[in-house]
Image (cartoon, rainbow, N blue to C red):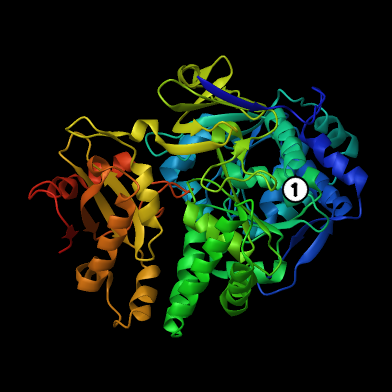
Amino acid sequence: MVEYSTPLLVEVAPDRNLNDLFAERLAADPDGVVIEHKTQQTGPWIPITARELDAEIVAVAKGLVARGVEPGDRVGIMSRTRYEWSLLDWAIWAAGAVPVPLYETSSAEQVAWILTDAHVTVLAVETETHAATVAEIRADVPDLREVLVIDGGAIDTLVAAGTDVPDDEIARRRGLADLSSLATVIYTSGTTGRPKGVELTHGNFYELTVNAVEGLKAVVSDPGSRTLLFMPLAHVFARFIHVLCIPAGAVLGHSPDTRTLIEDLGSFRPTFVLAVPRVFEKVYNGAEQKAAAGGKAAIFQRAAKTSIVYSRALDDPRGPSPWLRLQHKVADVLVLHKLRALLGGQARWAISGGAPLGERLGHFYRGVGLRVLEGYGLTETTAPATVNRPEATKIGTVGLPLPGTAIRIADDGEIEVKGVQVFRGYHDNPEATAESLDDGWFRTGDLGSLDEQGFLSITGRKKEIIVTAGGKNVAPAVLEDRLRGHPLISQVVVVGDQRPYIGALVTLDPEGVPGWLSAHGKPAMTLEEAARDVDVLASIDKAVARANKAVSRAESIRKYRILETDLTIANGYLTPKLSVKRSLVLKDFEAEVDALYESGPGGHDVALG
């Protein structure tokens, strides 16, 4: 086996817990700002100091105690990313309890499973709509005593309830846990079957965050560092950052509505952001289409090319030539500075995870002035296991192991992780735990490779490997990730298991199609009309041809079919972290997959009408 590890940089005493992590920030800078939040969408950002936040945490924790929450009890949070989410998380820990996050998009069936499996006793939901979802299954969740509605005054209700709880009780409860104690149960969104409850400890978060801060100082803990969370806090990626900001000394903000994200970025002005690759793709495609609509497509394309070439030259020991530096300066004046402005004007760093970003976009954004540091991790690794560093970056890889982390590649190519962030097991599921852990090594299910310097590259999912009728092993992610970057395309599912050749199911992007049509001088169309349009199909044909250049002919897409239905969270085909539920797609679109092979390879096919 190939193996690479990075030594631990910060040792943490075994009797510590996350409440101690917050206490350190409070002691170091009680009047320093920890969070900025809005009370109204169009209102100003209101700073909250460590002292003020601590007082709010204690007040809410007292309310939970008054409501009968005991140490070790499970308290659920079902909400979009907002200030109250962070407040509740820290308050639940202060009460000695265990937070259990639920996606606000969860169905009644999913809510019933998580509440029952985790034995949640008190649940905070964001809206009356969420409360109605819970009401549908309330009879099936015997442990659930109370549902509190954030928009209905849940925080004030808890504060009022806890007025008679002494400070000493919260201080006592804050000291009960140690590094080995359970901190949270996060349910994997799961592309197949029921989600599993991942048990993460106080040590997983504490040791990982303090070591990540040490390894990423320039990104997260420079003076003035601040980040705006817009990814769901129910997902481990955002949750990790929400904890990391405490030891980093960074200021945290929340943007609950993606429709106002650009305005929030502009007013909050983060220095670093975190997102999935789809966000970076959409920003690029949107900027390109806006330029085309204004008759400046050629200018944008030249600027984008210059940005990419300039970034690649930065990796050359000789650096960019004087002529290239001049071209880059012109491109920045004409185009690139506008993209920085979209992110608030002072974002220098971005952390990307969840899927490969792609070398082209990585270089483009670095040329813009935004260093996108790709990382890799899973819920079971408390988010990151590897990440590119400011001083050690290889675009196209997901970086080096974080301090206190080892990565090895098994004989079959599977990535295995060992370190401070690896979970302790699946909740009440010893069989799944035994299957995934081998002497502390977590079998990720992902395939990859390590280079001689320890940089990890992801090549696909072990369970998603397609074996064609000719015996060729194909990793679909390579093709899917490249195709999804096209502005016309929303989702791609590569197929071909036990088939004579590789095909693909493609959906059009409802947001991207109108801009593409306008940019190419074409009239407005419905998605059905666009799926039959000669120019649209020709553009997708070219995208398929470009994607195929990354693989051998036996692995290339020989035919694709455009579906009439997009794959979304709302219709159940995407997980909340935007992963395709492949098995469900293959089951529900079996007829469309069969149609790809009825007339042999070649070109496209439209599954409409």
Residue 365 rendering spot, x and y as whole percentages:
57, 61
Q: Count neighbours of disc 1 (C-alpha within 10 A) and say few if under 14, some if 14 to 19, many if 20 or more.
A: many
Residue 19: which quarter of the image?
top right
Using the image, determine if residue 437 lies above or below residue 278.
Answer: above
Residue 112 rendering spot, x and y as whole percentages:
47, 38
Q: Residue furthest left?
A: 599
Residue hosting label 1: 245
Residue 11 rendering spot, x and y as whole percentages:
80, 27
Would residue 261 be found to the left or right of residue 228 on screen? Answer: left
Residue 20 rendering spot, x and y as whole percentages:
83, 35
**Residue in front for this viewpoint, 229 or 113:** 229
**Residue in front for this viewpoint, 86 or 478:** 478
Q: Residue furthest bottom?
A: 295
Q: The disc labelled 1 sits on which kind of residue? A: Cys
Residue 139 seen anywhere in this rendered image of the structure? no
- Name which residue lies at 28% across and 56% down: 545
Would residue 483 be found to the left or right of residue 18 on screen? Answer: left
- Name which residue lies at 32% across and 34% down: 465
Using the image, determine if residue 469 lies above or below residue 482.
Answer: above
Count all numbered tags in the image, as a single digit: 1
Quadrant the C terminus occupies: bottom left
Q: Secondary structure at mark 1?
A: helix
- Name which residue lies at 59% across and 18% down: 440
Residue 61 seen anywhere in this rendered image of the structure? yes
- Name which residue lies at 46% across and 82% down: 296
Using the image, determine if residue 151 lies above or below residue 472.
Answer: below
